[in-house]
Amino acid sequence: MPIELQWEIPAPDDLTSIEALLGRVAEACFHTEGIQGAGFAIRITDDGGIRSLNRLMRGIDRETDVLSFPTVDYPAGKTAAGCPKRLRREYDPYLGCVNLGDCVINLDRARQQAAEYGHPLSRELSYLTAHSAFHLMGYDHMKEDEKAVMRDMEERALASVGMTRDAEPVDFDGLFAQACEAMQRAYAPYSRFQVGACILAGDGRTFQGCNFENASYGATICAERCAAGNAIVHGARRFRAIAVVGSTAVAWPCGICRQVLREFSDASMPVIVGAFGKGYEVRTLGELLPEALTPEDLGVDVGTQSNDH
């Protein structure tokens, strides 16, 4: 686990499992930055606790949502990925990782901000964790250009774990299980390589697909496009996530499937890919298809093209 979660206030019953989620968020931040073997401590407190700490450490006598205390002193213009030697100096044999520092999250403020923004508390806690993680890796937001870079990194990391800005978290396990189910129905007499896919649409519906081959090999349809066709014929025009599974190996979407998916989603969409019985990993569609040609480039709003009745 890349984080050590410490509660300075009693842990609410609805947040007893939050450590696993915040651990995934931290791992996503490290992956987005391009570092491995790192970790940090997260302390959860309330308005009074963070106000006292803010006054003690920064001389500011007021509440805030999150505080970050990095252990690494980064040179100007450098972040963690560009400072491997400095990171190695912070290796903690007791923790078994590079200790990036500490962050303190104010649960009272997190609840308030989640209500203000209209998204779940889990999303707000995930955002505050990501925000602090990138501070601990040398990012800042005092200048507009720096703020834009930091915000982009935060959103990429959060999207890769299904924590988009305005939606409930994506159930990666459930979506992958549906892809595995669809894989069992694949028609692959030539390659013997079965692939299943499951798309989560913007309205919460899911649509399965499987690969089906043809004696004229070029007529073969991939599982991803099969699932997309299933979604489209049922009126879905926005995709939130897709899971893809191969029967004997990881089945990353081919180039044309990536372009088809980009038609109905944005670059932050999680793509959950694995092999049957061997787990999965997650990337964003933007990582798989950078600099894509999009409907927006051609002046089309896909959301207005729905045929829902």
Image (spheres, helix red, strand yellow):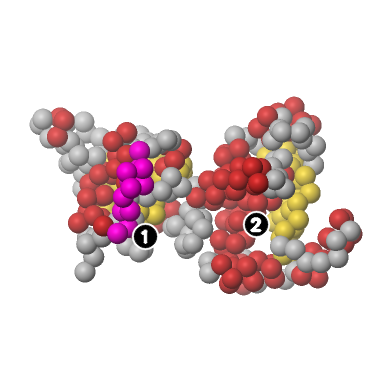
Q: Nearer the viewer, residue 238 or 201?
A: 238
Q: Which residues are magenta?
A: 293-304
Residue 25: x, y in percent? 58, 50
Residue drawn where x is 62% and y is 60% of the image: 125
Mark with earlier residue (1, 2):
2
Question: In percent of the image, x 53 and y 69: which residue is there?
Answer: 118
Foreground residue among 205 and 239: 239
Residue 301 visible in the displayed image: yes
Give left or right: position of 183 versus 136: left
Q: Position of residue 214 (x, y in %)?
A: 12, 35
Number of on-image labels: 2
Q: Which residue is mark 1?
A: 202
**Residue 294: quarter of image:** top left
What amino acid does circle 1 point to? Gly
> In terms of secondary structure, where does tag 1 sit?
loop
Which quarter of the picture shows residue 49? bottom right
As drawn, is 62 to the left or to the right of 281? right
Q: Residues within 10 Å of mark 2 (few under 14, many from 20)?
A: many
Who is closer to the viewer here, 278 or 141? Answer: 141
Q: Residue at x 22, y 33 (%)?
A: 192
Give how far across and how far down residue 172 sits, in percent: 43, 53
Mark 1, other Cα within 10 Å: few <14 / some 14–19 / many ≥20:
some
Q: Which mark is residue 128?
A: 2
Please, what is the three-letter code of the amino acid marked with disc 2? Leu
Q: Please, which residue is most extreme toward the front here?
A: 299
Residue 162 placement (x, y as % from top left): 48, 53
Secondary structure found at label 2: helix
